[in-house]
Image: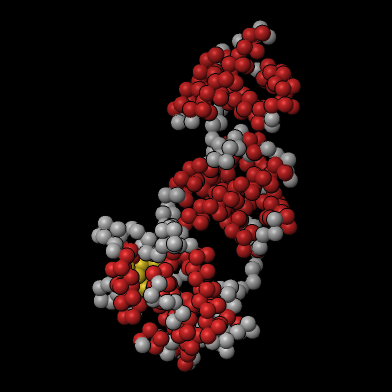
Amino acid sequence: MKQACSLESMVDAVLSEMKRRGNAKNTIERHERAYSQFYEYALTQGENSYSKVLARSFLEEKEKLSAYRGPRFMEQYRIALNKLDDIAKGQDIRLRHLENGYHLKSSCFDWVIPFFEERLKRRLKNTYDVNTIASYQDTFRLLLEYMAEQQHIKPYLLDYKHFSDKVILSFLNWLETHRNCSPSTRNQRLSAISAFFKYASQRSISALKICSNIASIPPKKTPRHIFSYFSVEELRVLLQMPDPRKPLERRDIVLLSLLYDSGARAQELCGIRVGDIRFSNPASVLLHGKGGKSRVVPLMSRPTRILQQFIAERKFGTAEKDAPLFLNQRGEPITPACIRNVICKYISRAKNIRPDLFNESSQSSSFAGGWHRISLHSRLFRTCLCPNDRNIRHSKSIHAE
């Protein structure tokens, strides 16, 4: 967009461009008010064209009111005048902003909204990926907070030059020291930042260098957690704990059986839809895993019969193939935390019946990671990682009975 001759035509150009790009009505009205006040001020100074000197003088006048108008009072004027400044320089006006309300001056974050809309929301369509999107959004919020508090750069002033590899490393260290983030969380934040700048570098030459610098930052090594698996007898007792006379516990019977038989992750279990179950021979379940990847897992006869009874009891219609298979007491889809609570409840119940199996010192009785032990037991069996372990080779006899 080229430089306009008069202040009035420059303002018209900005507002027209904002309308063309689909900016919110209240945002456009806020700019109109700012430009109206700036135009009146310019007339009092005998000016009818934009200049940095005039803009600075106008902001100094408004600064006198900011003490009792709040910190965002000045921001609206700076943002509006930045767009006029862009036109005066013959540059494209800067209109993008983050959803959390931070208005960004530079083109550095021009790709944030497309990144979320195209790279994440359109490509990651499974229910699992809602967590991924939330994690990425949280990363950007923390990054802006860090740049403002630690680097003393306000969000609307950020540019690519501010994001060196040293700054990103400092941000990652800040997460660990000031926010007590674990190394794995730190690596997730780094992955989100890398994904964004890789996306931006494909659309803006200015982002290429920063993308390569960030790509050179290695993830931090994290300790590997080794989960034990339940013994055959522990699983047998645990699967007998739900009371089939209670509707909610009938759901838990299906949940535990499917978790064990499929070796699914907790989030994969939460994402199962009615249409993901196939009762044809052999019966199977479609699991939606990380990164939008799916896999089909065959089911044994007993879990299949339990599933058939459960679905018949729920009275799903043919049009409800996208309905969640498992719901909580409020009729909402279950969450990984819900699965954790279910397992903890039945481990606690089993401890009262068989304290010799589920005792405090027993590694397998730990509440943490209960579903890992159930699904890991199944995965070990299915992949035959321990063919000489009699417990694993014969563990499917639990469902055969």
Work out whether residue 123 can be spotted. yes
Q: For this view, does 104 lie left or right of residue 375?
A: right
- Spot occupied by residue 254 in the image (x, y as percentages of width and height): 39, 73
Q: Residue at x 54, y 20 (%)?
A: 32
| Nearer to the camera, 364 or 203 | 364
Q: Residue at x 50, y 46 (%)?
A: 115
Q: Quadrant of the C terminus?
A: bottom left
Query: In the picture shown, does residue 339 fall above or below 194?
Result: below
- Spot occupied by residue 335 in the image (x, y as percentages of width and height): 48, 62
Colour pattern of the rendering: secondary structure
Q: For this view, does 38 lie left or right of residue 317?
A: right
Query: In the picture shown, does residue 253 fall above or below 48?
Result: below
| Nearer to the camera, 279 or 149 | 279
Q: Residue at x 44, y 82 (%)?
A: 240
In this figure, what is the number of numbered marks?
0
Q: Quadrant of residue 61?
A: top right
Work out whether residue 195 can be spotted. no
- Spot occupied by residue 290 in the image (x, y as percentages of width and height): 47, 63
- Spot occupied by residue 388 in the image (x, y as percentages of width and height): 48, 92
| Nearer to the camera, 179 or 343 | 343
Query: In the picture shown, does residue 288 fall above or below 59?
Result: below
Residue lying furthest front: 245
Q: Quadrant of residue 87?
A: top right
Q: Residue at x 59, y 50 (%)?
A: 138
Query: In the picture shown, does residue 359 fall above or below 201?
Result: below
| Nearer to the camera, 29 or 117 | 29
